[in-house]
């Protein structure tokens, strides 16, 4: 597992900013690069070239960012961010999902299962070697299913639906879209997420508090994982 070019994709500005600032502090060659996205930075870490993009929130932005990294020769794509907690996870915990699916893809009216896409793969897997590596580097909990959709989940009813229907551990707005692009292009992918809320009626307040006030913790944990990937 030796990569010469690593892609990093981050959706939210309050998650991306501490990471970019840390990269500039640690790596003297870190510099902004021109991309179609809000911001992007490039630097060398452990002999590997790293391109990190702040893609914006949601599945379309995430898929666009992932394809940009794929088109620019990244051999692996990494993601970090905040997630709502569903089943078997705790507030503030770091998790590494093994699989991803889109909970808001609904073709059930034509006889398909929730999230099922006709004649194509619709459950995407993280790279198992990277999952185990990230776990060994930072001790984050390996979980089974992360569900993804273009909606901030913030009601007890929606939370229970996602747990019951998909046996999901966490929910977010980007991971399955990134994983889909990586599946199509054959690029290994892994994501580390921090549980910021319970995806329930209190989710908005608790998410905003962590997103605004504790971004450095998420960034520092991911940076540890990134450096571990480049040194394997």
Image (cartoon, rainbow, N blue to C red):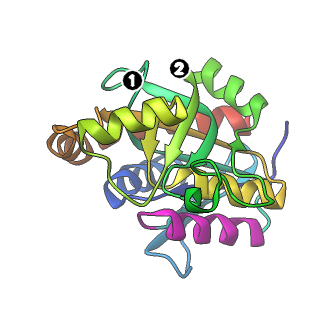
Q: Are marks 1 and 2 in contact (CB under 8 Å)?
A: yes
Q: Is residue 146 positioned above or below 76 on the image? A: above
Give the label on residue 93, or none. 1
Element type where label 2 sits in the image: strand
Q: Within the magenta stretch, is there residue 68?
A: yes
Locate the N terminus and report the quarter of the image it occupies: top right
- In the image shown, does 232 or 129 lie closer to the viewer? 129
Q: Residue 121 placed where, x, y %?
A: 77, 52
Picture coordinates of residue 207, whole percent (x, y): 24, 42
Name the residue that disc number 2 marks.
141
- Secondary structure under tag 1 reads loop
Quick check: can you spot residue 159?
A: yes
Q: Residue, x 70% and y 25% (percent of image)? A: 133
Residue at 25% across / 45% down in the picture?
Answer: 154
Q: Is residue 207 magenta?
A: no
Residue at 59%, 68% in the rendered image: 65
Frontmost residue, 75 versus 102: 102
The magenta segment = 56-72
Q: Quadrant of residue 72?
A: bottom right
Question: Quick check: 123 above or below 89?
Answer: below
Q: Residues within 10 Å of mark 1 (few under 14, many from 20)?
A: some
Tell me the distance, in whole angstroms, between the alpha carbons under discs 1 and 2: 8 Å
Residue 8 in view:
no
User: In front here: 48 or 165?
Assistant: 165
Name the disc covering residue 37, or none: none
Which quadrant of the figure contains the C terminus? top right
């Amino acid at each position: 597992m030796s990569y010469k070019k690593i892609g990093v994709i981050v959706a939210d500005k309050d998650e991306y900013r501490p990471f970019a600032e840390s990269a500039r502090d640690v790596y003297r060659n870190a510099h902004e690069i021109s991309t179609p996205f809000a911001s992007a930075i490039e630097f060398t870490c452990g002999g590997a070239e790293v391109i990190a993009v702040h893609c914006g929130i949601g599945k379309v932005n995430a898929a666009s960012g992932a394809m940009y990294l794929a088109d620019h020769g990244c051999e692996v794509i990494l993601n970090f961010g905040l997630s709502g907690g569903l089943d078997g996870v705790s507030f503030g915990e770091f998790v590494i999902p093994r699989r991803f699916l889109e909970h808001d893809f609904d073709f059930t009216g034509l006889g398909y299962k929730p999230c099922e896409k006709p004649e194509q793969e619709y459950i995407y897997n993280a790279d198992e070697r990277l999952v185990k590596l990230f776990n060994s580097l930072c001790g984050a909990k390996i979980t089974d299913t992360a569900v993804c959709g273009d909606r901030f989940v913030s009601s007890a009813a929606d939370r229970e639906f996602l747990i019951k229907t998909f046996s999901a551990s966490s929910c977010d707005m980007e991971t399955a879209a990134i994983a889909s692009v990586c599946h199509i292009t054959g690029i290994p992918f892994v994501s580390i997420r921090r549980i910021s809320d319970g995806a329930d009626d209190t989710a908005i307040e608790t998410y905003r508090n962590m997103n605004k006030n504790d971004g450095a913790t998420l960034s520092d944990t991911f940076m540890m994982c990134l450096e571990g990937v480049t040194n394997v």
